[in-house]
Image (cartoon, helix red, strand yellow):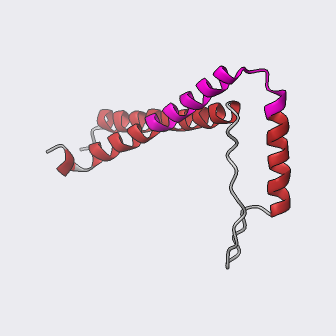
């Protein structure tokens, strides 16, 4: 017999943890970019069909980042606080993932 209440609890907790994890990660990225740390991927050479960015596009994005940093109304203290808070969000994301692994692997808590 299927325990529908247990299924609903598992589905609800999975949905809630997914929303929390994605929210923390998004907030972390937002705080890092607010603090002036632009997340750019350097152009790489790949042998396959995968390309990240052309050097021209990377230079354009770097110019945009510098322009946005100059136009930012935040003080240096606020920018540094945003970077620290963004890093804290990523640490919390890692903690949520590690707690999920702890719950799944029985040898860790037996």
Residue 87, magenta (yes or no): yes
| Picture quadrant where residue 14 is located | top left
Residue drawn at x 44%, y 34% as measured from the top left: 92
Residue drawn at x 70%, y 72% as measured from the top left: 45
How many numbered discs? 0
Residue drawn at x 64%, y 21% as measured from the top left: 77
| The furthest residue to the left | 110
Nearer to the camera, 51 or 19: 51
The quadrant in which the N terminus is found is top left
Magenta residues, dominant SS class: helix
Residue 83, magenta (yes or no): yes
| Picture quadrant where residue 84 is located | top right
Residue 9, above or below 51: above
Read off the magenta span.
Answer: 69-92
The quadrant in which the C terminus is found is top left
Residue 35 rendering spot, x and y as whole percentages: 67, 31
| The furthest residue to the bottom | 47
């Amino acid at each position: 017999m299927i325990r529908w209440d247990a299924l609903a609890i598992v589905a609800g907790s999975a949905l809630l943890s997914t929303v929390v994890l994605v929210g923390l990660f998004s907030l972390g990225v937002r705080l890092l970019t607010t603090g002036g740390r632009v997340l750019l991927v350097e152009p790489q050479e790949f042998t396959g069909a995968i390309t990240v960015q052309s050097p021209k596009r990377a230079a354009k994005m770097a110019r945009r980042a510098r322009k946005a940093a100059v136009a930012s109304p935040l003080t240096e203290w606020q920018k540094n606080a945003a970077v620290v808070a963004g890093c804290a969000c990523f640490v919390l994301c890692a903690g949520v993932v590690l707690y999920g692994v702890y719950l799944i692997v029985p040898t860790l808590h037996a």
